[in-house]
Amino acid sequence: MSDNEQNSHLTIALAGNPNAGKTTLFNSLTGLKQKVANYPGVTVERKEGAWTLDGKTVNLIDLPGLYSLDVTSLDEQIASDIIRGDQAGVPKPDAIIAVVDATNLERNLYLVTQMFEFGVPVVIALTMIDVFEKQGHEIDIEMLATQLKTPVVAVNAKSGRGTQGLAEQVAGVIGTTPEIPYEYRQEDPNSGPHGKIFARYNFIANVVQESVWHSDHQSHRITDKIDRVLTHKFFGLVILVAILLLVFQTIFSWASLPMDLLEKGFGAVGDFIKAEMPPGMLTDLLVDGIIAGVGGVVVFLPQILLLFLFISLLEDSGYMARAAFLLDKLMSRVGLHGKAFLPLISSFACAIPGIMATRTIESRRDRFATIMIAPFMSCSARLPVYTLMIGAFFGGKYVLGFVSVGALLMLVMYSIGIIVAIIVAAILKRTLLKAPPPPFLMELPPYRLPNLRTVLQNMITRAWLFLKRAGTVILAISIILWALMYFPRSSQKPETSSQNVTAAVPGAVATGEVPAEESQLPESEQLKNSFAGKLGHAIEPVIKPLGFDWKIGVALIASFAAREVLVSTLSIIYNVGKEENEESETLISAVRDAKTDDGKPAWTPLTALTLMVFFVLAMQCVSTIAVVRRETNSWSWPLFMTGYMTALAYIAALITYQGGKALGFE
Amino acid sequence: MTLTELPIGKDARVIAVNGEGRVTRRLLEMGVIPGVSVQKIKMAPFGDPVEIRVRGYSLAMRRTESDAIEVSV
């Protein structure tokens, strides 16, 4: 690796206002050759791609969407550091492509006037000209370039028109020094602290006056017409709720088929390996540890993809800003930003994309408060647990003759999560994350048809980040959990263990629903003597006040990796067989009939309710912890989150169980 | 009067943006500077935030921000 080779690599930065078409242009220039990571030490996303310029491959850096380079936010800090060449790991750019939206010229040019001051040559990529001209306005591009003393190229990122010209202009400016086209004297005593801002806008006003011809007749913009309905005081809210319902209904119903297929696929792979490989530790590790563990998380991929499909559609169309506009007052009562609503709503599917979606909130404290409460939203991983508990103890029961107890309990669980989240957010915003209300200045961009390519690219990026985590963190945790249940190996004597198993699941055997297969018998004996089993016994004193025995304890410990693991662990523990899913009649009856070591029923309706309450509030998801670690860039936040959530869960479960017992429930 | 007091649908010219800190600066950078004309478009369902049109685009802000903007009709 010679230094010369390094130096021949050019770096071009792509910068512009949010909604100026920057992402579309970036995707159009780099295609699939892009990578997404974080800048070291912060949570600002770093997007880079390869772009062919003058026959050479250059590195194109997509800067965060910005309104200004005068550092007031983290995004602006990173962007100005990069342009200055102060960002570690990123070479100083050789040129900047400034993406400028023709329909919003004045404010977009403000950022450009700041760019000139960094001494890096700038080429303006003018987008949305077709829209601008359709509105009846005209723009003189040559005049604009003359006034700004920098090249201006009209581009259409969707069709690719103009990108060739853009490449030529960028190649042409490299090595030149930009001229600052406006005058401002810092020492002018009359200018005040904001004199520079005024000077820039005065200059822009002149430029626009010279190069743009506005049509007289104020065409009623389509956006205004749509907004008359979508941000209407009453109908706006009704439509918002309807859209959210539609999104979540679709996520659940569309995702169920591919999820089933994935689940069956992993099952089939596991079966295949079991059949083809000699029995032994390696096979067990592959099947019960890696495939079951990683597979259990990867099955959520369809939901993640669909959620990000909808997020992208809502964001790109411009609706997301309207939703934040409609809900900001409600959210600000709790101390949150209007933009927090979508991450929270997303968390009902899964907290991971929800937490990832908090990136749209600029204020760090608002963002962290949102992250801290996102896992209280009952995610889809809690559903199998709720379903099992309700199916086993509350199925087929009705109150008032027609309201199903199961549906009611489900509603109660979701409500507990929401109410606790509101309280915690209010407390956090008054204590740890106390801050003056952040400026709420949000652009309501014109409605636009989402760009299919941008939407797909976003889905692929999110899916890849999700899979990468499944392949690393979750893989490691799965192996550890498996090892805890697998070691130490107990001597396998079917005669002695069979007695134990019968004692553990007498009902299941008696009803004949569970064929007591000889090969499965050592499983529960093994579990009892495993590290996990010992752990279960060790925590029994702690969970006894909640009405849980050591076997539930084992499942509880395992469920801290991922909530739905409770179901699979219970089915191993009660020896029903690993292939059973949560709806299985046999697992339900095994749970109903399970006995503690002293022969009492291990589960009562009250225990089931207590467990559900615990699951609403506890932080039992390694992937979420990993994501919070990444998004907050510290270990203290995820640890704090795990600690306080689990403490809350324990207290709430204790109140539920002891209170229920005091009221005479079982 | 302040932008908060400006009736919905009315045009006005910005006279001053009061205050010093980050919010003021951001307002100015978004193009809300003395002399620019603004139009109040609508209020959100619960009376806050408010949507204004400035320099050809729509900007939403909370009451705390619109209180700081002095306008004349």
Image (cartoon, coloured by chain):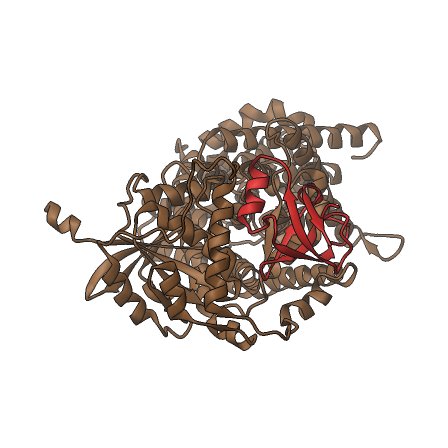
Chain shaded red? B
Residue B66 falls in image quadrant:
top right
- In this picture, is A189 found above or below B8? above
The quarter holding residue A26 reads bottom left
- Between residue A646 and residue A438, name the one nearer to us: A438
Query: Left or right of A475: which side holds A527?
Result: right
Res. A55 in view: yes
Q: Which quarter of the image is occupied by the C terminus of chain A? A: top right
Q: In the rendering, at what x and y percent does residue A134 appear?
A: 54, 77
Residue A583's x, y, as percent? 62, 55
Residue at 11%, 49% in the rendered image: A4
The percent position of residue A108, horizontal first and vertical second, equals 48, 57
Instruction: Say left or right for A44 vs A538.
Output: left
User: Would residue A437 appear left or right of A87 to someone viewing this image?
Assistant: right
Figure colour of chain A? brown
Please tell me which residue is depicted at 77% across the width and 63% down the height of the picture: A235
Q: Can residue A280 be seen in this view?
A: no
Residue A465, given in percent of the width and then of the height, sits at: 41, 51
Which residue is nearer to you in this view: A623 or A596? A623
Q: Nearer the viewer, residue A313 or A601?
A: A313
Give the residue drawn at x 45%, y 64%: A454
Q: Which residue is drawn at 26% across and 45% down?
A: A91
Q: Please count the marks in the image.
A: 0
> Is A183 situated above or below A271?
above
